[in-house]
Image (tube, grey):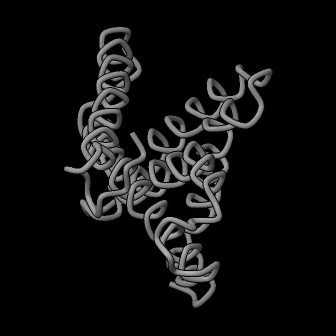
Amino acid sequence: MSNHTQVQKQYAILPTMYRVVFAAVLSASWVLIPQAWFLPIIGVALFLHTLHTRTATSLLKTALPGTVFGVTYAACALLWFWDILPLDWIDAGLIGGTLVLFLSWLFVAGAMGSIFGLFSIAYRRFGSLSVLSSLFFASLWVLLEYAQMWIFAFLTWGTASAKSAHFS
């Protein structure tokens, strides 16, 4: 095997990650531009196509594109977090408040988006181009959206919330 082929195989995951991030941004574009309601359809289709055509050799390499997609999607969909600056009520100053907000935004996006790693494992293992498989994974996608809602509700539920964020 030539050195060029080894380098290609070593970095083959990078174009996949670029596609996955692009698909996630397209999928979350409706948050910033409601008139672009059709872009999430293209984004999810690109993500599923990427999962379907990818050959992963390990569980981690299978879960990684889904996790990257989910965290990027959630981070884009949660951009409204930044509208609450400045955080005068925590008395941490502008830099401290921005850091708290950034870490909260990243934590919530990571918690909400990581479940798509499990989706990508299930899709790679059981997915096919059949109608039944398509219906199953479309339903699973909707269930994961509900799971994201409950994760967000748990993390931001008044005084019982993680770090008492009081977003609800």
In the rendered image, the quadrant that contains the C terminus is: top left
Residue lying at the far left in this picture: please name it: 160
Is residue 50 toward the left or the right of residue 40 in the image? Answer: left
Viewer-nearest residue: 165 or 53: 165
Depth check, front residue: 59 or 86 = 86
Left or right: 83 with respect to 72? right
- Name which quarter of the figure residue 37 lies in: top right
Q: Position of residue 167 (x, y in %)?
A: 42, 46
In the figure, is residue 69 to the left or right of 33?
A: left
- State whether residue 75 is above or below residue 13: above
* Residue drawn where x is 62% and y is 46% of the image: 80
**Residue 102 in the image: above or below residue 54:** below
Residue for point 66% across, 51% down: 83
**In the picture provided, is 17 more to the left or to the right than 168?**
right
Q: Residue at x 25, y 38 (%)?
A: 122
Q: Which one is nearer the viewer's eye here, 51 or 35? A: 35
In the rendered image, residue 20, in percent from the top left (x then y), is placed at 57, 51
User: In this figure, what is the number of numbered marks?
Assistant: 0
- For the view shown, which residue lies furthest in the bottom direction? 3
> Which residue: 59% across, 76% down?
8
Q: Position of residue 126 (x, y in %)?
A: 24, 32
Estimate the x, y position of residue 75 in percent, counting from the top left: 54, 53
